[in-house]
Amino acid sequence: MYSIRQGTIFNGSSLYLETILRLIVLYIGNITSYEQLKRQCVDERGVQLSPSTISEWLTHFREIQLAAIVRHSHGKIGGPGCTVQIYECKIWKRKLGKYEDTVCGICCESGGMFAEVRGKLDSETMIEVIAENVAEGSTVITDCWEQYDQLEQDKWVHLTANYDLNFVDPSSGRHTHSVECTYWHVRCRLPKAVAASSENMVMHSAQYIWRRKFGQSDKDVCLAFFQHIHELYPARSGDKLLEVSSPLAATGLDSV
């Protein structure tokens, strides 16, 4: 049976459309407290959202923001005088219904990001991903994984850090936290158990960077977020990606 949800952000969810729209509006308003979302997203039956449902939707909203940042970051990120954080993580793709092994990079100064899905993460693959996405002369910060050792012989300044134990590069003694970095803006706001996950760091960094890049005003935040929903879920009435003229257009339901 055909559903009006098919091909939209609402696809696969049993929540009322009104509840999902309310979640979106609250998220755009920078409200991510589980308790506040539970209180304000009670459906018409009086049922509150479960923590797992809230987590799933917040993750998907951050996925939308990450995809938008990657689409709007042109060329390689970083460069001389810039620092790029590298993460390897499994990112949940709600539209595909599966996790994907992903290499992500974040430029601390510009907020540029890349995200590459790769089947294996050996030394050759990691160097290839960095070469394709990070400008020469960048300072590249990774964890202490030995797969990155070759970076020291290539075209980047390489620092390592065990984010759980210390913030000092063991080879040079340089304090990586001396860099004014997106990483630290995000990590200091997260509980320790949450910040320990590379996936959480990437997704929360995407939320922070997205708002910095697209959220010059409340109106900009609203229109930009619905535009980026529209880019991930294009309207079904035609193949051409149209400019969003209203929030309803972005959800795909105006074409029904």
Image (cartoon, helix red, strand yellow):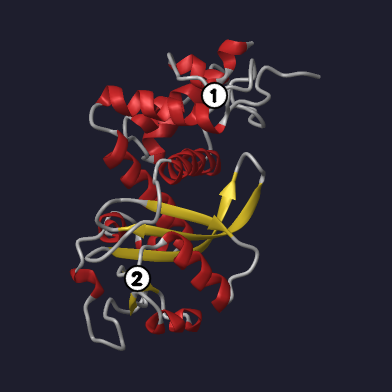
In this view, 6 is above or below 172:
above
Q: Identify residue for label 2.
A: 140
For the residues marked 2 and 1, what is the alpha-carbon distance in whole angstroms? 36 Å
Q: Residue furthest bottom?
A: 171
Q: Identify residue for label 1.
A: 241
The residue at 58%/15% (across/down) is 253
In this view, 223 is above or below 182:
above
Which amino acid, mark 1? Leu
The residue at 40%/84% (across/down) is 153
Q: Is residue 190 visible?
A: yes
The residue tagged with tag 1: helix, strand or loop? loop
In screen coordinates, is 166 left or right of 115? left
The residue tagged with tag 2: helix, strand or loop? strand
In screen coordinates, is 167 left or right of 197? left
| Disc 1: CA contacts within 10 A as few (<14), some (14-19) or many (>=20) | few
**Image quarter of residue 233:** top right
Q: Is the N terminus in the top left, top right, bottom left or bottom right quadrant?
A: top right
Which amino acid, mark 2? Val
Q: Is residue 196 visible?
A: no
User: Residue 85 placed where, x, y %?
Assistant: 36, 65
User: Residue 134 placed where, x, y %?
Assistant: 39, 62
User: Residue 179 placed where, x, y %?
Assistant: 21, 66
Q: Earlier in the sequence, mark 2 or mark 1?
A: 2
In screen coordinates, is 247 left or right of 156? right
Compare residues 218 and 46 and report the one nearer the observer: 218
